[in-house]
Image: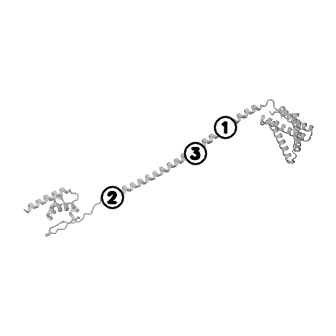
């Protein structure tokens, strides 16, 4: 349900009429008092603008006591100027009537504002208290928003730092992984080369030169004799054979070992000595 709009009281129209009359009279009087043409008009216009601004602020209840005091200061100042204009014109009537119009207009305007005021309306102090609460709430809300924004900025900076550290860790892990692969490949290569290096190589049997006496030069039998191909001779037979063809036991031992590299050197030497002893005993 809409509240019916109240009509303006008649006193308000009277206040408007007095304000207009006061503005016209003050504009003329101040301009005539200044004797400066356009500059005097500017002073009068400035006073009128200030007067109208105060009336608007008071009508809309803006500014509180400050506006009210400013309105009376302007009214008194304009009244003084109008009184000076009357003195300048040597007219007592103008010196009294000029300020009287301004003061009556200001008084009627103030009464009109009081009449128009809603009895249930809040006082200026209450409005100020409400404004303080609103201002305090706005301050707390904006402060909270500023703190949240600051927290968000810190969180973004922290997240960016974590991402940067993670990228560094990832790059380090990638480098360690690549180095590990290279080490594994190098180790495998070394193992392959090591197997080739330590693999047993069957040496070719070098030709054996058996010393012989000048009277009877004897050549070394070939390694691939029919006997070695079918069955290796015994150490005893080899010792007897080489003792018979060489007078030096050491040469005989080397010759036997060349044919039987798997034989024990000490056993071969013992067999050569026994063969030598038998051969000497047989010659005797």
Mark 2 = which residue? 197
> If you read the primary sequence from the N terminus, does the residue marked by circle 2 or circle 3 appear first?
3
Say which label, 1 or 2, has the lower sequence index: 1
Q: For the residues marked 3 and 1, what is the alpha-carbon distance in whole angstroms? A: 24 Å
Visible in this render: residue 110? yes
- The residue tagged 3 is 157
SS for callout 2: helix
Percent coordinates x, y for residue 45 in the rendering: 84, 44
Q: Quadrant of residue 150?
A: top right
Residue closer to the observer: 158 or 230: 158
Say left or right for 274 vs 140: left
- Where does residue 144 sit, x and y in percent of width and height? 64, 38
Q: Residues within 10 Å of mark 3 (few under 14, many from 20)?
A: few
* Total numbered labels: 3
First in sequence, mark 3 or 1: give its number.
1
Q: Residues within 10 Å of mark 2 (few under 14, many from 20)?
A: few
Residue bearing mark 1 = 141
> Residue at coordinates 51% horizontally, 49% vertically from top-left?
168
Residue 196 in picture, x, y percent from top left = 34, 58
């Amino acid at each position: 349900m809409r509240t019916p709009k109240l009509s303006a009281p008649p006193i308000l129209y009277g206040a408007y009429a007095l304000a207009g009359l006061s503005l016209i009279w003050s504009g003329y009087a101040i301009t005539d008092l200044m004797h400066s043409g356009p500059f005097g008009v500017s002073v009068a216009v400035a006073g009128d603008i200030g007067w109208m601004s105060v009336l608007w602020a008071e009508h809309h209840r803006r500014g509180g006591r400050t506006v009210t005091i400013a309105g009376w200061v302007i009214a008194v100042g304009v009244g003084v100027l109008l009184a000076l204009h009357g003195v300048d014109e040597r007219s007592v009537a103008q010196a009294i009537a000029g300020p009287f119009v301004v003061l009556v207009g200001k008084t009627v305007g103030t009464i009109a504002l009081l009449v128009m005021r809603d009895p249930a309306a809040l006082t200026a102090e209450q409005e100020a208290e409400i404004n303080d609460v609103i201002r305090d709430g706005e301050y707390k809300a904006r402060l909270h928003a500023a703190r949240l924004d600051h927290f968000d900025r810190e969180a973004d900076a922290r997240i960016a730092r974590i991402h940067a550290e993670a990228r560094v860790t990832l790059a380090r892990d990638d480098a360690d992984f690549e180095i590990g692969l290279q080490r594994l490949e190098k180790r495998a290569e070394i193992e392959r080369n090591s197997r080739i290096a330590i693999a047993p190589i069957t040496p070719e049997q070098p030709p054996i030169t058996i010393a012989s006496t000048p009277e009877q030069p004897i050549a070394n039998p070939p390694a691939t004799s029919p006997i070695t191909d079918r069955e290796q001779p015994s150490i005893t037979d080899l010792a007897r054979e080489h003792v018979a063809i060489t007078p030096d036991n050491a040469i005989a031992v080397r010759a036997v070992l060349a044919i039987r590299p798997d034989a024990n050197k000490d056993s071969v030497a013992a067999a050569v000595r026994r063969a030598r002893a038998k051969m000497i005993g047989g010659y005797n």
